[in-house]
């Protein structure tokens, strides 16, 4: 029995309520100041029953106090899975969430300038953020009809459709007099009600779903060098996998299994090679073609086709775009991004950034812009040189964060690979089972590759 679709939202809401130590926690405080006949009491009690509500030291809930812009944005971000409690704080405690929401277009700088992060959020802005953050498909539809809102004309033009959609879906309701009061401040009681309604709309029943265990092997340079896999050993590994009944598949095959229910072979395995070394073209590709195997190769944009770093320092030679195109056209290789220029790290010298992670001296706005620019640059190169856009991103050094995951998702990357070792359970209908895939390091392994894989099932 597996949760599917958006059920993961419940988990992140739990993280939001349970872990955050910012003022928004007080929004779901205890109950001694909430009478049983208070209109929001059922919602507040539900949060407590679910284990989400945490009280203040004095046991108050303060239902009529207001939620700030930053608190509400952080709340919605966590419901989408962008858990900023796992990120370093910036200049403002909610900077990761606010900058992510700004990038996603949930609000404009004019609607929430930086100076107003800690001011109460209005009901109309809350409706816009909520709809774009949690119900994007509905939010992007032009609202048809006329909602029964007495003061709809008072809603700002940039928020009107979102208010209408949220109202029609029953997420943010109006007042007994038929008004919505778009400029009114959103209270903590109202936020509790909104959270419960959103949870109800996102609720998905668990059901039996087909699951397949898939090992993903990782290689780098195919050479006789220490720590590398020799050409002869690579061949032996591929032959051993075939004898053991494994069938090499593309990551796109896993994607079709998850999203379309397309069947996978009996014992699927994914072969990956990182960094785009010339040895992949000279040695690995010929073995793959001969044996009818498939592999995914992650390339670093700036180094494609080079044997030096541009500063006179030699590097391991990398295959060219023309050679990459040959491999792709053969049908046994797919080329994916490994960043354009975010694969730089030296533990023995000044560290600018670790893989794609944020530098300590960057603001979150600067970081998001740099990361997105890098990803778009390598994507445009693959499209120009190879004729397709990849939906697979391989993290340099395996380093990722909740923010990079959400940014990649927004850019169309449905599959991400890390370096944590293990076997992957790929679940039909569960798109999250394709994220941060574990991999088994085969580099330099001298023994039986099949026994290495089987050791991870124990």
Image (tube, rainbow, N blue to C red):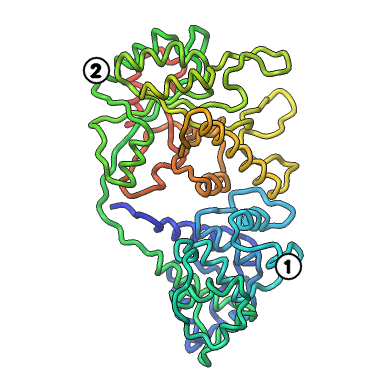
Badge 2 local density, few (<14 within 10 Å), some, or many (20+)?
A: few
Quadrant of the rendered image containing residue 257:
top left
Extreme residue toward the bottom, this view: 177
Give the labeled residue for mark 1: 116
Quadrant of the rendered image containing residue 152:
bottom right
Please report the residue visible at 56 percent of the width from the left and 63 percent of the height from the top. 75
State the residue in front, 99 or 62: 99
| Residue 246, position as x, y percentages in the image | 27, 25
Please report the residue visible at 40 percent of the width from the left and 64 percent of the height from the top. 202
State the residue in front, 60 or 176: 176
Mark linked to residue 243? 2
Task: Note whether 94 is above or below 88 in the view shown.
Answer: below
Callout 2: helix, strand or loop? helix
| Mark 2–mark 1 CB contact (< 8 Å) | no
| Residue 359, position as x, y percentages in the image | 70, 39
> Can I make out residue 113 in this image?
yes
State the residue in front, 194 or 58: 194
Badge 1 local density, few (<14 within 10 Å), some, or many (20+)?
A: few
| Residue 416, position as x, y percentages in the image | 47, 38
């Amino acid at each position: 029995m597996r949760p599917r679709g958006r059920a993961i939202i419940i988990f992140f809401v739990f993280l939001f309520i349970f872990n955050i130590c910012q003022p928004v926690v007080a929004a779901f405080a205890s109950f001694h100041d909430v009478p049983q006949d208070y209109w929001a009491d059922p919602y507040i009690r539900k949060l407590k029953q679910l284990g989400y509500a945490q009280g203040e030291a004095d046991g108050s809930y303060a239902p009529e106090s207001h939620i700030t812009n930053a608190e509400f944005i952080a709340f919605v971000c966590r419901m989408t899975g962008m858990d900023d409690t796992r990120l370093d704080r910036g200049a403002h405690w909610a900077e990761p969430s606010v900058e992510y929401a700004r990038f996603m277009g949930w609000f404009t700088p004019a609607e929430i300038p930086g100076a107003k992060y800690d001011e109460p959020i209005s009901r109309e802005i809350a409706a816009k953020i909520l709809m774009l953050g949690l119900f994007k498909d509905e939010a992007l539809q032009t609202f048809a009809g006329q909602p029964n809102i007495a003061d709809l004309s008072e809603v700002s033009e940039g928020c009107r459709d979102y208010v209408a959609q949220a109202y029609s879906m029953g997420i943010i309701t109006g007042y007994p007099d038929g008004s919505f009061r778009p400029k009114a401040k959103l209270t903590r009681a109202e936020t509790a009600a909104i959270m419960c309604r959103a949870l109800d709309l996102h609720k998905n029943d668990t059901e039996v779903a087909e699951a397949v265990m898939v090992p993903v092997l990782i290689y780098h340079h195919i050479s006789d060098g220490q720590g590398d896999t020799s050409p002869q050993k690579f061949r032996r590994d591929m032959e051993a996998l075939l004898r053991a009944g494994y069938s090499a598949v593309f990551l796109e095959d896993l994607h079709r299994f998850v999203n379309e229910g397309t069947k996978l072979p009996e014992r699927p395995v994914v072969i990956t090679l990182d960094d785009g070394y010339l040895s992949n073209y000279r040695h690995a590709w010929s073995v793959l073609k001969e044996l009818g195997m498939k592999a995914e190769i992650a390339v670093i944009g700036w180094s494609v086709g080079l044997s030096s770093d541009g500063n006179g320092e030699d590097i391991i030679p990398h295959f060219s775009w023309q050679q990459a195109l040959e491999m792709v056209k053969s049908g046994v290789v797919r080329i994916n991004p490994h960043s354009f220029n975010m694969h730089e790290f030296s533990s023995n010298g000044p560290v600018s950034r670790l893989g794609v992670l944020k530098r300590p001296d960057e603001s979150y706005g600067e970081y998001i812009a740099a990361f997105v620019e890098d990803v778009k640059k390598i994507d445009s190169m693959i499209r120009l040189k190879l004729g397709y856009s990849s939906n697979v991103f391989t993290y340099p050094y395996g380093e990722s964060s909740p923010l990079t995951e959400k940014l990649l998702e927004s850019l169309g990357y449905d599959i991400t690979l890390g370096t944590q070792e293990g076997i992957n359970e790929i679940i039909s209908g569960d798109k999250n089972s394709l994220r941060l895939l574990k991999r088994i390091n085969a580099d330099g392994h001298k023994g039986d590759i099949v026994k290495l894989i089987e050791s991870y099932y124990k």
